[in-house]
């Protein structure tokens, strides 16, 4: 008996992106998801009417306000679980999939695999790598991957075991969600995928990037772009929550000065670029994170 796959995406004031994303889901071969769920996150434009009027068969869940990434996706994921999904594919609405991406991910869905992700390129630079997950430093918890921002060399291993995967696109087995839970809704935006990845790894499950599964992402469109005040605020606030949660013992003595250095580096960069509003938002986010 074939497994039931339900795809979940979240829309916020970007119906064109969402419809393009949905189209790539419907074109997956040899089989598309059994159901596509769109959570409209309190859009204030014509998103809901546009989505309802589309020719695509979708399940539309409408929030009365912006729930944020974690809560928005959790609503869709819980719907998928309640309706018998064996796998839940979450995908940012500003991302698109190659036609065989889902099939290639499913090829590696083994019992000890907690989540799978494709190789994701920049949408406007189709062969430059945006994300394929990566490793985290055992003490500072900083993430790294030497391939990010580089042209795909074309000879990557078929699968790469990682410490973290980006929440942009994830194939999540039902068993993983039952074991580790959904996204932590304390992360309104950003770092929810890092937190989820940590919990999956702590549950002794593997995180895999499938490099033959390809996708493309319009970066930071939902947050107003890189170094926007909105993006800087939530990146800062969520980072505090993450490092306070997972910093342990003597490593906190390393993390604290490391994070301070990172904050100063970000401050100088924003000052150099004349991003005064983003700078104020960044420090407000850090302070709000410390007050939580």
Image (cartoon, rainbow, N blue to C red):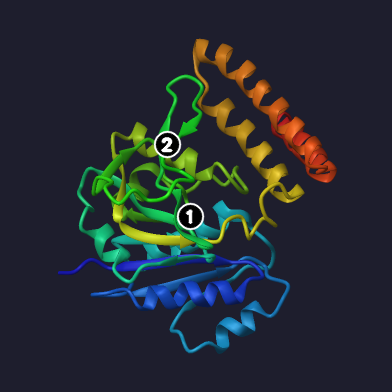
Task: Please state which of residues 243 and 186 is positioned toward the viewer in this rendering.
Answer: 243
Q: Quadrant of the N terminus?
A: bottom left
Look at 58% across and 45% down and name the residue there.
190
Q: Residue at x 46, y 47 (%)?
A: 166
Crowd rating for badge 2 (residues with CA inside 10 Å; few <14, some 14–19, many 20+): few
- The answer to which quarter of the image holds residue 77 is bottom left
Residue at image x 69%, y 64%? 65
Query: Horizontal placement of 246 versus 34: left or right?
Result: right
Q: Position of residue 41 (x, y in %)?
A: 62, 65
Q: In the figure, is residue 117 to the left or right of 72?
A: left
> Does residue 181 appear anywhere in the picture?
yes
**Which label was assigned to residue 146?**
2
- Regarding mark 2 in the picture, which secondary structure is present there? loop
User: Residue under circle 1?
Assistant: 168
Mark 1 and mark 2 lie on one chain; the one further toward the N terminus is 2
Nearest the camera: 271 or 137? 271
CA separation, marks 1 and 2?
19 Å
């Amino acid at each position: 008996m074939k497994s039931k796959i339900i795809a979940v995406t979240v829309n916020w004031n970007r119906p064109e992106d969402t419809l393009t994303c949905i189209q790539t889901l419907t074109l997956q071969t040899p089989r598309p998801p059994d159901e596509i769920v769109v959570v409209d996150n309190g859009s204030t434009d014509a998103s809901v009417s546009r989505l309802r009027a589309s020719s695509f068969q979708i399940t539309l869940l409408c929030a009365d306000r912006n729930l944020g990434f974690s809560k928005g996706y959790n609503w869709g994921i819980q719907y998928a679980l309640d309706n018998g999904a064996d796998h839940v594919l979450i995908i940012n609405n500003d991302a698109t999939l190659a036609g065989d991406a889902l099939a290639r991910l499913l090829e590696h869905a083994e019992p000890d695999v907690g989540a799978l992700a494709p190789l994701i390129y920049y949408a406007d630079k189709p062969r430059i790598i945006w994300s394929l997950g990566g490793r985290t430093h055992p003490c500072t918890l900083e993430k790294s991957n030497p391939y990010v921002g580089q042209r795909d060399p074309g000879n990557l291993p078929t699968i790469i075991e990682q410490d973290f995967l980006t929440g942009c696109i994830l194939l999540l087995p039902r068993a993983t969600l039952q074991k580790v839970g959904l996204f932590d809704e304390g992360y309104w935006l950003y770092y929810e995928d890092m937190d989820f990845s940590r919990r999956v790894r702590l549950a002794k499950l593997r995180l895999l990037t499938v490099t033959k599964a390809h996708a493309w992402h319009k970066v930071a469109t939902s947050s107003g772009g890189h170094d926007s005040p909105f993006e800087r605020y939530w990146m800062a606030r969520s980072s505090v929550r993450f490092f306070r949660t997972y910093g342990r013992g003597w490593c906190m003595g390393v993390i604290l000065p490391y994070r301070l250095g990172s904050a100063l580096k970000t401050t100088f960069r924003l000052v150099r670029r004349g991003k005064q509003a983003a700078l104020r938002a960044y420090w407000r986010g850090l302070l709000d994170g410390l007050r939580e």
